[in-house]
Amino acid sequence: MSSDKVTFDFKGKSISCRPGTSVAVALWEEGVRVLSHSPKYGRPRGISCARGQCTSCLMRVDGVPNIRTCETEVRDGMTVERQDTGAFYGAGMQKILATADNLFPVGFYYKWFTRPTALNRVFLDMIRPLTGVGRIPEPGTELKADGLSNSLVTDLGDFSKVIVGGGPAGLAAAVESSGPVLVLDEHHECGGQRGTALREATTALGNRLERFPVLANSGRRLDGLIKDFSARPEHTFLGGVRAVAGYPPNGLLLRRENDLATMNFRELVWAAGAMDTLGLFPGNDTPGLIGPRALYRLLLRDGLDVAGRQVLILGNGIDSWLSAVLLAERGARISLVITESGYHTEISAAIDAKWQLTTGFKLASIRPHGEGQLAATLVSRESSPSGPLHSHLQLEADLAIICGQGKPTFDIPFQLGIDMSLQQDRGGFIPTGAGESSVFSGRLPDGATVAVVGEAIGETVMEPIVPPGKQKNGHPEGSAQ
Amino acid sequence: MSNPKTILCRCEDVTLEEFREAFSEGFSELESLKRYTGTGTGFCQGKGCMSEAAAELAVLRNIPPEKVRLTTIRPPAEPLTFGQLASLDVPEFQPAREEER
Amino acid sequence: MIPLSSEPVPSTADAVIVGAGINGLATAYELAGLGLKNIVVIEKDYIGSGSTGRCGGGIRQQWTTEENIRLAQESVRMYEGMSAELGYQVFFRQGGYLMVTESEDDLPALRKAVELQNICDVPTEFLQPDECLKIVPDLDISHIKGATFCPKDGTAYPFAVVWGYARACHRRGVKIFIRSKVTEVTADQGEIRSVVTDRGTISTPLLINCAGPWARSLAAMVGVKLPNRQERHEIMVSESLKPFLDPMVISISNGIYFSQSLRGEIVGGIGDPAEPQLEGPESFDTSSGLRFAVRFAKALLAYYPRAAQVKMMRQWAGMYDVTPDHRPILGGIPGLEGYFHICGFSGHGFMLGPVTGRRMAQFITTGRSDKIINSLSLDRFERGDIQTDAFVVG
């Protein structure tokens, strides 16, 4: 049955895993939780965004540096290496720096050893080999540019209206459109990342579904949208495609795996959703700490094996309940930290399911613990951090899922010329002037339009958002600094 | 217990403390804070930290968050190899918008 | 160090410099060093936000006119000591410039340039294509017909240079105001009187125009017509890797240049013949184009195929302030006392700014005639005294 397994090399060791998973997940299941070390302080980093959008999982794969292992599928015979080449200062110095805060003040490299000139030269000669992460591929491993295939369909010209994001917001926009639209999504299935997770959870829950009204309601809404979208044969859904750049006045650069394609639009609906927000607190880069979107990808795309693992879920909203159901379904041990009020029906279901529940506490810090686990320190929500009745609680886990309000994705509309400003109650940057409205539409200089909808503007289509001020969302409040 | 650090920018390993220190040195805008501390200049190009950095700057400057000037987010939205880019045909020159008259 | 935008500007100053790029700050620093007090620098965005902060940071002495060679040579000497002078690390690294051509027709000019540079004590040498491999082992030399190499050319980090100057200016009492726009300049009886900004009016006898691509508009406020045109140029940076490339590689055949910064990134650009020359800020466009990214990637891989799997992180654009002969415009204007300009660097302001700032500061404070400033004065275009350099690249 060797064909059921893929074998690759990590540090001279053969690692066997199931095909179709990512390098990062294969290593995690093998007990390798630390994929890289941070460049300055040498802090351990593991899987984080699971979407190839952060640095935490960058490794050298088959001699190519800075490969996003969370998005790289395992292949037989591949070689995977950590890039612990000392990054900025060398491995020994990193150990010292990991525990020392004030040894290297901010911008020290602008300030130290500037005089005299001879010393400055020695300093520059010394630091040059220490900068950079990863080595350039050796000569001969390069792809010849003309040898690259570009199989992605480039003729998308019949669609003057393009919707980026096939989740609820994108589908709703498509259903409302009169003419034919092209819906792009980086996931292969219609319904988006959370939608796919939701469908699995509702199926798994079966007749227990109504015990989780937030999932039942969202699932029904999504099913309806997918049905309405399917009833419109003039619309097209193209999965596995990610928008990777916006070029004025109206160009999009798209990527499917290694292939790039360009297209122009007259109308763009940006429904690309939000990214996980982990928040600012001590230890916020600890391996094992992820957001719900990353969890959905790890479970559904990579089949992360969580059976018997202790998982800590912080928050109280659709993502915390969806995460809990998916994880429990896969045999994980669930510990919920309810950070907000509400969702009483779901809480009683959690009690019946014998999930561990903690209320009245909020997250203060997280640190690595034991062999690849983490420990979260919680403080009482009532006591002030400086007060004498400061009550602490420590919870240990293999994974911690922080389910807060997501950060709207805004980069491509911004690149196309839509001005953005920070609106904290919407989770991040949204179009300037969007105000309280749930749809923003902007006209580009040459007459094309960009609309921003759904989570990309801080809304959620899954369930109606509670007016600002009534609900602070599931984000762990502040951080006891 | 190891020294607890709050990481503002993972890619360039910038702590929240360092960001505040840079502000106290006279770097008062995201554009200069970004270049001085490295915040947002790494592999993720600010996806992981720019809104957090902007929120922190609003507190440091005591201004409303929506008044914080965002730095220019340049393409591409994720790193692309020169090989990938070279596989495309050279697009026609797009005249500067204002030149269209 | 730098006043936040809410503070008002002083009502009087001995000099107002417009533009906090390399030219404005180097000039302010040198003027203060020569004893001028109460210098104010007005910057409409932030320090280095114009052309300086968008440039590739290259400093080379490989030119075809003696004037350019001498100026660049003086500038390299200043860069060599700049970190110590300013007490700030500017990351000047002399990895050399390798200048290649794909045309046999260029070879006589390259040899002649080497000769002239050697006369000026610039240690440039002519290289056969295979000799380039000693400098850049992985270079694809199949299209290269010849090259020149000067090991003393180099690169610095543009932002570090302007921050270093800004801090040193601050120590010398110069006041820098960011996010401040000049709206009007008043002159009376042929003398500069005041500079009006959106944060107040400053009475001053001295206005120094270091506004880069905006210099033309500022000059127009005092009735001076500059022949400068503005041209968009794009540039990009790659992921940061361990050192693999020592020099700046530059092609006079297709206008590509690329080097590896001290942070480990490939920094490079390529000129685009399709780019129009514009007139003034109302037509500025610093947006990014896919055309540049594709053209750069193709040209880079033609010379350096080893970079095929290296990732481009981001691209941006800036404006060149271009004169008809690609040489800067320095000096003052007869009949307008107190007005000076340091502009029109045509893409070479970062490499020449320190030396032109120093020469202009001496010229302004002493009034002593300077051969180079005379040669680069605005009236050269009327005199017809124009010499062009063959090595304008990028």
Image (cartoon, coloured by chain):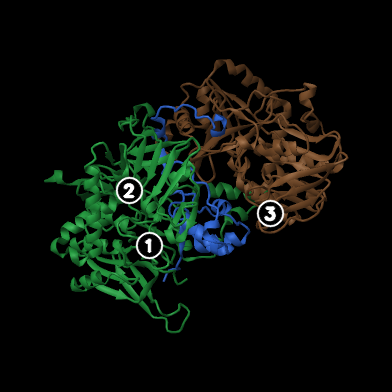
Looking at the image, residue A223 sits to the left or right of residue B58; the answer is left
User: Which of the chains bears the disc numbered 2?
Assistant: A
Residue identified by numbered label 2: A69
Q: Residue at x 51, y 22 (%)?
A: C144
Residues marked 2 and 1 touching at CB (< 8 Å): no
Going by the picture, which residue comes out furthest to the top?
A: C105
What is the distance, in whole Å, between disc 3 and disc 2 at their CAs? Answer: 43 Å
Label placed on residue C167? 3
Task: Decide which of A346, A91 is in the foreground and name it.
Answer: A346
Asked if residue B72 is positioned above or below residue A478 in the image, the reply reads above
User: Which residue is labeled 1 in the image?
Assistant: A286
- For residue A389, what is the image quadrant? bottom left
Q: CA distance from mark 2 to mark 1?
A: 18 Å
Q: Any idea which chain is the green one in this picture?
A: A
Give the amino acid at mark 2. Thr
Q: Amino acid at mark 3?
A: Arg
Expressed as whole percent of the image width and height from the top left, the position of residue C53 reads 60, 43
Task: Give the percent coordinates (x, y) of residue A291.
Answer: 34, 59
Q: Nearer the viewer, residue A412 or A217?
A: A217
How crowded pointer 2 is (Cα within 10 Å; few <14, some 14-19, many 20+) is rated as many
Residue A270 shown left or right of residue C108 in the figure: left
What subunit carries mark 3?
C
- Residue C331 as seen in the image, left or right of residue C304: right
Is the C terminus of chain C in the top left, top right, bottom left or bottom right quadrant? top right
Q: Position of residue A89 (x, y in %)?
A: 49, 54
Same chain, labels 2 and 1: yes
